[in-house]
Image (cartoon, rainbow, N blue to C red):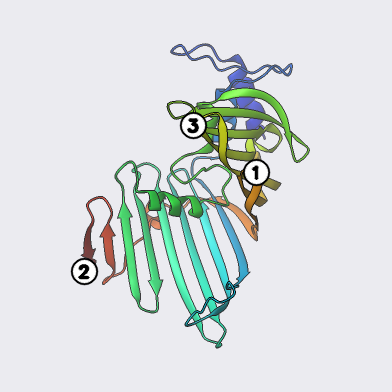
């Protein structure tokens, strides 16, 4: 069987200029173009195929001294199933809260984002009812983008569901080689804002399908670094020929040169299979669900 990454390398190395755009890479080790790196990353997504990721983690709940809570919790367990296709990304997440009095409460949240239409949907089911939201106007509201960033947090190909990492690479500048976790990577940098008040840095590893080893989002105030959010992916596993997915990743929020917050995550399993249709993955609202339409602020009840 033909190695798809090797094939794409040959094609892109030999390609002629098209519409003024030249994509190049040298087999002799010459620095590749940002477009070449992005093309390799995009090849991780195959037509008609899907990635399904399952995860589970439990947090011990601690309260600050002196804080009184009417119904204190002891643990929160979260179980998730995330699916990515070329058309839709979707997540079903179940949160189980265990209280110190022995009672248990469960919340089920289903989310989907249609990458073609830009429509985001979410359904939340609790003991007290079903609630939904729909948003499609660009730019999406800030809190919806926050939800979407959390929704795709295990996926190395997204910086929030709206923004593929390949776009950050493609629009950026190749800054040379740099190692991440002992792995040789190509580093790209993308400036945004009037005075480059934000930088998106991506370290791309060709050895794992041009997936990112690390992504940093850096904010600036003048020439000083205001804050940095860093995600590092590790333990990549090959789930199909030329298709890779990280089993672990860690995040760090850095302020004033010190780590203000850090987390580590791991997935239970990754499956590669024939993609469901967009309709199957998109959130459907049961009868009686109250749905807020974020575009105009109105609320409807599903008949």
Number of other residues with Cα within 10 Å of mark 2, as a class: few under 14, some 14 to 19, many 20 or more: few
Whichever of labels 1 and 2 marks the residue nearer the N terminus, that label is: 1
Number of other residues with Cα within 10 Å of mark 1, as a class: few under 14, some 14 to 19, many 20 or more: many
Left or right position of 293 against 184: left
Left or right position of 6 against 274: right
| Along the viewing direction, whichever of 281 and 49 lies nearer the viewer | 281
Count of numbered labels shown in the rendering? 3
Number of other residues with Cα within 10 Å of mark 3, as a class: few under 14, some 14 to 19, many 20 or more: some
| Tag of residue 65 | none
Whichever of labels 2 and 3 marks the residue nearer the N terminus, that label is: 3
Q: Quadrant of residue 290?
A: bottom left
The image shows residue 2 at horizontal and vertical percentages of: 66, 32
Real-space Cα separation, disc 2 to disc 3, in angstroms: 47 Å
Left or right position of 128 against 257: left
Q: Is residue 51 above or below residue 129?
A: above
Whichever of labels 1 and 3 marks the residue nearer the N terminus, that label is: 3
The image shows residue 261 at horizontal and vertical percentages of: 62, 54
- Image quadrant in which the N terminus is located: top right
Q: Is residue 34 above or below residue 128?
A: above
Q: Secondary structure at mark 3?
A: loop
Q: Secondary structure at mark 2?
A: loop
Real-space Cα separation, disc 1 to disc 3, in angstroms: 33 Å
- Image quadrant in which the C terminus is located: bottom left
Residue at 42% x, 45% y is 87
**Nearer the camera: disc 2 or disc 3:** 3
| Tag of residue 303 | 2
Real-space Cα separation, disc 1 to disc 2, in angstroms: 43 Å
Q: Check disc 1 and report the residue beneath it.
A: 244
Q: Check disc 3 and report the residue beneath it.
A: 197
The image shows residue 198 at horizontal and vertical percentages of: 50, 33
């Amino acid at each position: 069987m033909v190695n798809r990454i090797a094939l794409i390398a040959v094609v892109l190395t030999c390609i002629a200029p098209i519409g003024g755009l030249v994509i190049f890479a040298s087999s002799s080790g010459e620095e590749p173009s940002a477009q070449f790196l992005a093309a390799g990353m995009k090849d991780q997504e195959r037509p008609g195929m899907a990635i399904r990721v399952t995860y589970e983690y439990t947090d011990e709940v601690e309260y600050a001294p002196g804080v009184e809570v009417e119904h204190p919790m002891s643990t929160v367990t979260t179980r998730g199933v995330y699916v990515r296709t070329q058309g839709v990304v979707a997540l079903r997440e179940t949160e189980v809260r265990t209280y110190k009095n022995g009672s248990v409460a469960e919340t089920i949240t289903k989310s989907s984002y249609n990458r073609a239409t830009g429509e985001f949907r979410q359904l939340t089911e609790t003991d007290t009812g079903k609630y939904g939201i729909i948003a499609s106007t660009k730019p999406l509201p800030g809190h919806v983008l926050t939800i979407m960033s959390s929704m795709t947090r295990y996926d190395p190909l997204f910086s929030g569901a709206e923004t593929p990492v390949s776009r950050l690479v493609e629009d950026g500048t190749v800054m040379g080689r740099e190692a991440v976790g002992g792995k040789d990577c190509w580093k790209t940098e993308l400036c945004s804002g009037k005075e480059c008040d934000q930088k998106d840095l991506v370290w791309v590893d060709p050895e794992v399908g041009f997936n990112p080893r690390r992504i940093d989002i850096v904010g600036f105030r003048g020439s000083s670094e205001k804050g940095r959010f860093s995600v590092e992916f590790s333990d990549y596993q090959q789930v199909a020929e030329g298709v890779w997915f990280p089993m672990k990743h860690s995040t760090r929020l850095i302020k004033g040169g010190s780590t203000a917050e850090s987390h580590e995550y791991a997935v239970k399993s990754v499956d590669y299979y024939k993609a469901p249709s967009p309709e199957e993955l998109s959130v459907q609202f049961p009868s009686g669900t109250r749905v807020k339409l974020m575009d105009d602020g109105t609320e409807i009840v599903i008949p």
